[in-house]
Every structure is written in structure tokens, then in C-alpha cells.
Image: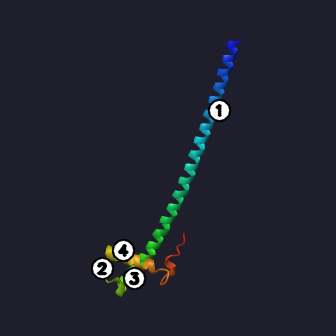
């Protein structure tokens, strides 16, 4: 009698432990799945943003080059014919700020 009761108790304990382990595994799987989903979404977002930024940068850069070649008063910082980086940076910042007013097509970037 005593041994059978002990055996039953041990079996019950083992079953409870198995259930707990299964629950832990499920929780871990769910957490991993959530992390994977978040990472994918973030990666897609950052890639699309960088593409958009690159396109916008390219558009602004061409405008800046045009201004420098025409010798506009806003781009006097360009000392060399090779269009130096300081001028580009300064003009790009100015052009980006003023893009809404003067050239709205610069800020509207399409993927095509």
C-alpha cells in the first residue's frame, strides 16, 4: 500500500514537471518568434529609409552642383572645380531645409 502511494506521488510529480517544461518551451518559442518578427520589420524599415535618403541626397546633390556651376551667391564656399565636400554638406543642409518652399519635388521621393 505504502509503495503504491509513493509511486503514484512520484508519477504525479513527474507529470507536473513535464507540464512545466512544456509551458516553458512554449513561452520561449513565442518570445523567439516575437523577436524575429520585430527584427524583420525593423530591418525592412531601415532599408527603405536609407534608399529614400539616398535618392533624396542624389537629387539634392545634382541641384547643388548646378548652383555651383552657375555661380549662385548661396554657394560661394565651393573653391575648386571638383566641388568640395564642405560646400556640398553646407548646401545640402540648406537645400533640404528649403526644399518644401523652393523645390517640393526634392522631398517627395518615390521608389520607382
Query: Toward the viewer: 37 or 79?
Result: 37
Q: Is residue 21 visible?
A: yes
Q: Residue at x 45, y 81 (%)?
A: 98
Dot 4 or dot 3: first in sequence order is 3
The residue that mark 1 highlights is 19
Crowding near the residue tagged with mark 2, few <14, some 14–19, many ≥20 C-alpha atoms within 10 Å: few
Dot 2 or dot 4: first in sequence order is 2
Q: Position of residue 78 (x, y in %)?
A: 31, 80
User: In the rendered image of this protein, does residue 30 appear above or below residue 102?
Assistant: above
Residue 14 lies in what quarter of the image?
top right
Dot 3 or dot 2: first in sequence order is 3
Task: Give the Cα separation between the discs numbered 3 and 1.
Answer: 71 Å
- Front tag of 4 and 3: 4
Q: Secondary structure at mark 4?
A: helix
Q: Residue at x 33, y 73 (%)?
A: 85
Identify the disc placed on residue 89: 4
Identify the disc placed on residue 66: 3
> Where's the N terminus, which quadrant?
top right
User: In the rendered image of this protein, does residue 93 appear above or below residue 70?
Assistant: above
- Front tag of 3 and 1: 1
Task: Give the Cα separation between the discs numbered 3 and 2.
Answer: 12 Å
Task: Give the Cα separation between the discs numbered 1 and 4.
Answer: 62 Å
Q: Is residue 71 visible?
A: no
Question: What number of labels is visible?
Answer: 4
Identify the disc placed on residue 83: none
Q: Position of residue 46 (x, y in %)?
A: 50, 61
Dot 3 or dot 1: first in sequence order is 1
Amino acid at each position: 500500500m505504502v509503495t503504491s502511494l509513493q509511486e503514484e506521488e512520484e508519477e504525479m510529480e513527474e507529470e507536473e514537471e513535464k507540464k512545466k517544461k512544456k509551458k516553458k518551451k512554449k513561452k520561449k518559442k513565442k518570445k523567439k518568434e516575437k523577436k524575429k518578427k520585430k527584427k524583420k520589420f525593423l530591418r525592412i524599415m531601415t532599408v527603405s529609409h536609407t534608399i529614400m535618403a539616398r535618392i533624396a541626397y542624389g537629387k539634392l546633390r545634382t541641384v547643388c552642383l548646378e548652383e555651383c556651376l552657375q555661380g549662385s551667391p548661396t554657394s560661394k564656399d565651393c573653391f575648386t572645380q571638383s566641388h568640395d565636400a564642405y560646400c556640398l554638406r553646407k548646401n545640402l543642409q540648406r537645400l533640404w531645409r528649403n526644399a518644401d518652399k523652393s523645390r517640393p519635388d526634392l522631398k517627395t521621393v518615390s521608389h520607382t
